């Protein structure tokens, strides 16, 4: 089974966030990323935000 992840360290910004999120499905990961993006980074949950984030998902596990 594939695993998907996204790592905030790949997208430096004002928050200097070092969180990496991963999940077994893109849908599960998307929900976690939307919550994190909203609470920590102040992103608004819009269809455009969701569409752009999914494009950034990578297969595998985040680097240590």
Image (cartoon, helix red, strand yellow):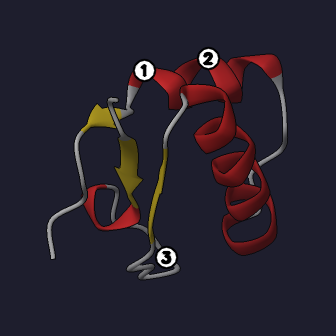
In the image, residue 1 lies at what x, y percent? Answer: 34, 29
- Between marks 3 and 2, how big is the CA–CA gap? 22 Å
Q: Which residue is mark 2?
A: 51
Q: Is residue 17 above or below residue 20?
A: below
Cβ–Cβ under 8 Å for marks 1 and 2:
yes
User: Along the line of sight, which residue is nearer the eye, 21 or 50?
Assistant: 21
Q: Earlier in the sequence, mark 3 or mark 2?
A: 3
Q: Is residue 38 left or right of residue 22?
A: right
Give the Cα separation between the discs numbered 1 and 2: 7 Å
- Left or right for 13, reference 52: left
Instruction: Report the residue marked by disc 3.
Output: 14
User: Please, what secondary structure does the residue beneath circle 1 have?
Assistant: helix
Which residue is at a point 67% across and 66% down the rendered structure image? 41
Callout 2: 10 Å neighbours few (<14), some, many (20+)? few
Q: Is residue 12 above or below residue 34?
A: below
Tag shown at residue 55: 1
The residue carrying pointer 3 sits among few (fewer than 14), some (14 to 19) or many (20 or more) residues within 10 Å by Cα, namely: few
Position in image of residue 43 (x %, y %) = 74, 51
Mark drawn on residue 40: none
- Tell me the residue at 69%/53% (across/down): 32
Residue reaching furthest to the left: 63
* Image quarter of residue 37: bottom right
Q: Residue at x 26, y 57 (%)?
A: 10
Front-lying residue, 57 or 24: 24
Q: Secondary structure at mark 3?
A: loop
Nearer to us of marks 3 and 1 is 1
């Amino acid at each position: 089974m594939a695993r998907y992840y996204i790592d905030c360290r790949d997208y430096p910004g004002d928050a200097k966030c070092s969180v990496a999120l991963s999940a077994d499905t893109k849908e599960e990961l998307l929900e976690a990323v939307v919550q994190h993006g909203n609470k920590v980074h102040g992103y608004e949950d819009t269809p455009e935000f969701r569409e752009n984030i999914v494009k950034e998902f990578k297969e595998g596990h985040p680097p240590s």
